[in-house]
Image (cartoon, rainbow, N blue to C red):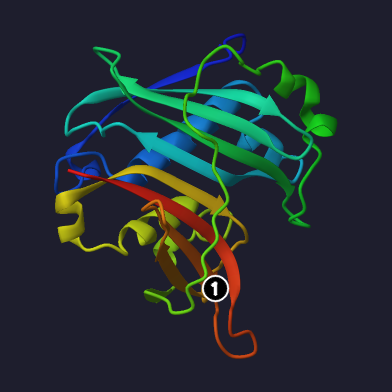
């Protein structure tokens, strides 16, 4: 397995993993992608457990998922994941999502990861710490034919929703889980919206951490190309009226 640069993992779209249309939830897909990244790294010697021993941890910086369609309830599907590039402070990891029985491509995803020191929260030099072990697993032949995450800017000053960080938002690292932001963002749209629209592309850019007790405000605006840009800020008002940006997102919808 360690000699194989591509990791392949199988899943089933279980009933409690699908939405009211009978298709896999975006947040469940996002969670599967992150789990695959963890499995792939662990099996090759640079997973969370290994790097935690030296007081480091992996953090997700960017994620872009583009889906032609979502697996339906009870469908079996596979996710391939591989490392495309390794830089000094970041590494690019790609994904392909496809049917297990027929190989039908559902979509692809791109992600960018950093390793940080758990005490200082500062990024680590990947080439200095893990250069040889990471470079050995770079895969450049397998295609990932979607665009990388782009720049997202939101000028809207009035939030469409504000909520407090709660128990279910917090992960093992003590901050809001990456996927919880996806859940909160998709909840900005009413159910009726999803009757006539489907998400085709979902981008996330993670900027800062948020913690229990923080308040999150969601700002949204539609761009000239029809995309929806969203910015999440924590603790707006008071001495810092604009708050601090914790993440940004871009959603592209198709009409059903």
Q: Quadrant of the N terminus?
A: top right
Q: Is residue 171 above or below residue 99?
A: below
Residue 165 seen in the figure: no
Q: Is residue 116 above or below residue 163?
A: above
List the residue tagged with mark 1. 234
Front-lying residue, 252 or 125: 252
Q: Is residue 249 left or right of residue 99?
A: right
Residue at the farthest bottom position: 238
Q: Quadrant of the C terminus?
A: top left
Residue 79 spot, x, y in % from top left: 40, 24
Residue at the farthest top position: 3
Front-lying residue, 207 or 57: 207
Residue 140 seen in the figure: yes
Q: Could you say whether the residue bearing mark 1 is in a helix, strand or loop?
A: strand
Q: Is residue 7 above or below residue 236?
A: above
Residue 239 spot, x, y in % from top left: 65, 89
Residue at the image position 41 percent from the left and 46 percent from the top: 202
């Amino acid at each position: 397995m360690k000699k194989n640069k591509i990791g392949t993992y199988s899943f089933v779209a279980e009933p409690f993993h699908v939405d009211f249309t009978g298709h896999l939830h975006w947040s469940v897909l996002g969670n599967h992608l992150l789990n695959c990244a963890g499995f792939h790294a662990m099996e090759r010697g640079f997973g969370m457990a290994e790097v935690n021993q030296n007081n480091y941890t992996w953090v997700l910086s960017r994620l872009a998922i583009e889906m032609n369609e979502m697996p339906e309830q009870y469908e079996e599907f596979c996710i391939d994941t591989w490392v495309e590039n390794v830089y000094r402070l970041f590494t690019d990891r790609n994904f392909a999502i496809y049917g297990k029985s027929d190989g039908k491509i559902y979509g692809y995803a791109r992600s960018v990861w950093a390793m940080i020191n758990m005490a200082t929260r500062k990024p680590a030099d990947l080439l200095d710490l893990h250069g040889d072990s990471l470079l050995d697993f770079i895969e450049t032949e397998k295609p990932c034919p979607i665009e990388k995450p782009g720049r997202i800017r939101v000028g809207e000053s009035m939030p469409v929703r504000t909520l407090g960080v709660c128990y279910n938002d917090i992960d093992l690292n003590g901050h809001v889980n990456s996927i919880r932001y996806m859940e909160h963002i998709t909840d900005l749209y009413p159910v009726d919206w999803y009757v006539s629209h489907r998400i085709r592309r979902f981008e996330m850019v993670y900027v800062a951490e948020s913690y229990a007790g923080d308040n999150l405000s969601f700002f949204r605006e539609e761009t000239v190309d029809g995309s929806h840009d969203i910015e999440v800020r924590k603790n707006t008002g008071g001495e810092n009226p604009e708050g601090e940006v914790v993440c940004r997102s871009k959603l592209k919808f198709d009409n059903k």
